[in-house]
Image: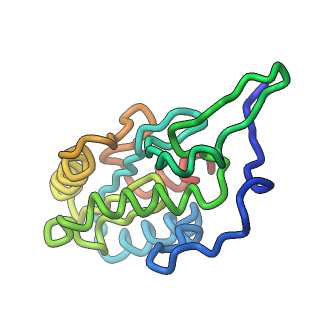
Amino acid sequence: MDLYVDYRHGIPDNTVVSHLEDPTPFDRSYLIKTVRSFKVQYPGACFSVLRLWSAPHFYPLMLGYNNRSEMSFLDDRSRLWDFKFVPKDMPYSEWSVHEQLSLRIRPYRDKLPTNKVIVARDLLLVMGETRSECRRLSEGATWAVQTRPWRLEIDFWRSFVGVDAEFLADLDERWLE
């Protein structure tokens, strides 16, 4: 059986902090539409989808000590589980990972422009006009994510580097969610 915890009963209806960007528009259809329009503009375009490493149930983001009690629960044997990382099934967790990934890229926006490196929840869509530009932008984005402080890293087992638009369009939907 898989693990799912419904955290909504212990967390009051929060309004999301106003400076956070809603990542829900960056879904598969948005990414494929963006890739196709970029390909029309640059016929030799090359793409990468770089996904953050994460455990199956948690993002690699530490919960603040004061928030851990809201993420704790007792199992059927009265054992206390106290999670230290942000659960993926926690409300608005995708907002948190989107913000953290955006913060890693933001200082390098002059080299990783928003029209070529798009943050979409826990992945980066990299679009190069040429294969060499895609490689340069992918390397730069990987460096920006994994540099100090080293908390986040790209999961190359779940990423696609240097692929064409048709490859991304033909991927199963789950790869781009």
- Give the farthest residue toward the bottom: 18
| Percent of width and height locating residue 42 | 29, 71
- Give the farthest residue toward the right: 76
Residue drawn at 76 percent across, 56 percent down: 8
Residue drawn at 53 percent across, 68 percent down: 23
Residue drawn at 38 percent across, 53 percent down: 164
Left or right of residue 141, residue 56 in this image: right
Residue drawn at 58 percent across, 36 percent down: 83
Pick the residue in front: 12 or 132.
12
Left or right of residue 35, residue 104 in this image: left
- Give the farthest residue toward the top: 77
Quadrant the N terminus occupies: top right
Whether residue 143 is situated above or below residue 15 in the rendered picture: above
Left or right of residue 135, residue 7 in this image: right
| Percent of width and height locating residue 85 | 51, 40
Whether residue 44 is situated above or below residue 87 in the rendered picture: below
| Percent of width and height locating residue 101 | 37, 57
Left or right of residue 109, residue 10 in this image: right
Residue 130's image quarter? bottom left
| Callout count | 0
Pick the residue in front: 12 or 143.
12
| Percent of width and height locating residue 58 | 55, 39
Describe the colour scheme in one phrase: rainbow
